[in-house]
Amino acid sequence: MEIAVIGNSEFILGFRLAGINRIYAADTLEKLVMHITHVLEDPEVGILVLSSHDMARVPQRLQITLEESVQPTVIALGEEEGGISMRERIKRSVGVDLWK
Amino acid sequence: MALKDIKPTRSELINIKKKIKLSQNGYKILKMKRDGLILEFFKVLGQAKDSRGALLVKYARAQEMMAIANTVEGSIKVKAAALSVQEKPDITLRNKNVMGVVVPKIDSNKVRKGIADRGYGILGTSPVMDEVATSFEELVEAIIESAEIETTMKRLLNEIEGTKRRVNALEFKVIPELSEARDFIKMRLDEMEREELFRLKRIKARNES
């Protein structure tokens, strides 16, 4: 299986240098959503890498799909933006702030 | 279920008793599931904290190195070098089941490459390019590790939240309401029995006099 990276051209270039073939340049929101939907349906992709900024930009419904997806597993790079942070999520589920 | 909707009959009482037993069993099982999930979650929590931190550090370093390479070599040269890399990292993704929660298990190889395997010419590029490639390879390694742990965490947390809601609903809503209905039917049935007894006694008294 392969790793796919979606983002602006600066973001994806470095990953190409690490040997990742499936890089998709998406400068507009429409392109971003299109590429994400395309990659989610691809059975050959194991991990999908996005920047946190892009993750926060996509529609809510797609964000939920991305967060719940196991194959491909989605990971957002960079400081968490928008949505609920991991800390908040833990606080809500377990009842105690364990992320210290 | 409002009390006024309940029919005070014996069959209803038996039904409600059955429901209470079922709810109590479900409650016990769900409570055990919740505790089990929390235990699993604690196992992943430590790893997740470390991996997220490491990932952010590596991402920042990779970006910094890329900026340096763009300055030193020029963006066209960096692009050309990037496009010549052929060997791609290979990952295997399997699904693991943790108490009914499907989580990914990722194995990887060929992420780190030697300078000679990267595909771009060593003579035509400066060591900065190698540094960038190395930093991005390290980043990809961290991503692979993090992806598994973070997704596991998120899914476990979602499941814990859902199970907690169900446990609480059973404990504070379903079981108390059913118990209330059971007590109400019992009370009504006893009341009816007493009325019946009283009526019989009165009839008997009237017949005797």
Image (cartoon, coloured by chain):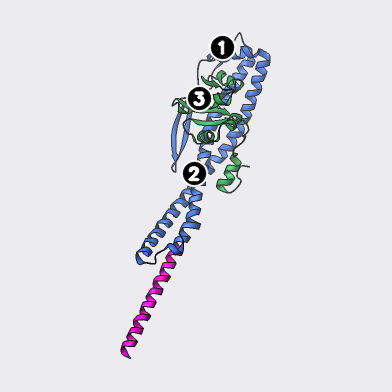
Chain shaded green: A
Q: Say which label, 2 or 1, has the lower sequence index.
A: 1
Q: Position of residue B135 (x, y in %)?
A: 60, 22
Residue B95 bears which disc, if any?
none
Q: Which residue is mark 2?
A: B159
Mark 2 crowdedness (10 Å alpha carbons): few <14, some 14-19, many ≥20: many
- Whether B162 is drawn above or below B111: the answer is below
Kind of residue at badge 2:
Glu
Residue A3 bears which disc, if any?
3
Magenta-colored span: B179-208
Name the residue nearer the viewer: B196 or B115.
Answer: B196
* Residue B154 appears in the figure: yes
Q: Residue at x 63, y 29 (%)?
A: B57
Name the residue nearer the viewer: A97 or B141.
Answer: A97
Circle 2 chain = B
Q: Which residue is mark 1?
A: B120
Can you tell which of label 1 and label 3 is closer to the viewer? 3
* Residue B38 appears in the figure: no
- Looking at the rendered structure, the secondary structure element under dot 2 is helix
Chain B, hue in figure: blue
Mark 3 crowdedness (10 Å alpha carbons): few <14, some 14-19, many ≥20: many
Q: Is residue B59 left or right of residue A44?
A: right
Task: Report which quarter residue A25 is drawn in.
Answer: top right
Q: Check if residue B4 falls in the magenta segment.
A: no
Q: Residue at x 43, y 42 (%)?
A: B100
- Whether B167 is drawn above or below B145: the answer is below
Circle 3 chain = A
Kind of residue at badge 1:
Tyr
Q: Please tell me if label 2 and label 1 are on a single chain.
A: yes
Q: Position of residue B138 (x, y in %)?
A: 58, 25
Separation of marks 1 and 3 at Cα, in angstroms: 21 Å
